Image (cartoon, helix red, strand yellow):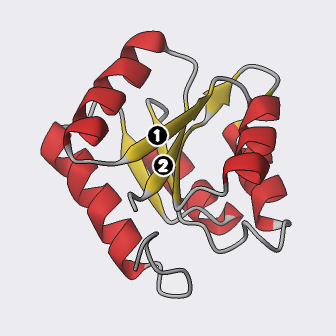
């Protein structure tokens, strides 16, 4: 069974770019485009990994991280934050909030895919789906 990744992003072009790369690698994808749907989709789909933008409608990525980390069945799911915001200020904040990695937009495809693979491999308490 494929690893399932939840992409939480409101920019359709960014969603498309990430989806094309991840589907080509064989990942199963689910999507949310705002903070509220991110929580409900995560609860319903139980993804193996979450790719999360910070600037979202109906709340921000920090709120999403906080709520996901408070849910026992989702607290161990790795979260990779992708954002155009200044990494010097925001990276420490997202890591402190509970995210596993911060990638600044725009990023290279190889960097993005490497981060996905490493997060899935290192999540430890939760083996990839199908294993």
Q: Is residue 90 left or right of residue 127?
A: right
Q: What residue sits right under mark 2 in the picture?
A: 5
| Residue located at (34% from left, 76% from top) | 121
- Note whether 102 is above or below 41 in the view shown: below
* Residue 10 falls in image quadrant: top right
Residue 109 lies, in percent from the top left, at 18, 38
| In the foreground, 89 or 65 | 65
Contact? badges 2 and 1 (CB < 8 Å): yes
Residue 90 lies, in percent from the top left, at 55, 47
Quadrant where the C terminus sits is: bottom left
| Residue located at (67% from left, 25% from top) | 56
Q: What residue sits right under mark 1 in the picture?
A: 29
Label 1 packing within 10 angstroms: few (<14), some (14-19), many (20+): some
Residue 103 lies, in percent from the top left, at 37, 47
| Residue located at (39% from left, 69% from top) | 120
- Farthest residue to the top: give it: 12
| Residue located at (54% from left, 80% from top) | 126
- Note whether 124 is above or below 25 in the view shown: below
- Farthest residue to the bottom: give it: 125
- Note whether 67 is above or below 120 in the view shown: above
Residue 23 lies, in percent from the top left, at 29, 37
- Note whether 82 is above or below 47 in the view shown: above
Secondary structure of the residue carrying tag 1 is strand
Tell me if residue 61 can be seen: yes
| Mark 2 and mark 1: Cα distance apart in space | 5 Å
* Residue 52 falls in image quadrant: top right
């Amino acid at each position: 069974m494929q690893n399932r990744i939840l992409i939480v992003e409101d920019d359709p072009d960014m969603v498309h770019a990430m989806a094309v790369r991840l589907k080509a690698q064989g990942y199963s994808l689910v999507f949310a485009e705002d903070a509220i749907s991110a929580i409900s989709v995560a609860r319903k789909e139980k993804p193996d990994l979450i790719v999360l933008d910070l600037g979202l409608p109906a709340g921000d990525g920090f709120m999403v991280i906080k709520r996901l980390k408070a849910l026992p069945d989702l607290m161990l799911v790795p979260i990779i934050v992708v954002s155009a915001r200044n990494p010097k200020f925001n990276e420490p904040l997202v890591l402190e909030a509970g995210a596993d990695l911060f990638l600044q937009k725009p990023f290279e495809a190889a960097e993005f895919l490497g981060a996905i693979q490493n997060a899935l491999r290192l999540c430890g308490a939760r083996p990839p789906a199908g294993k």
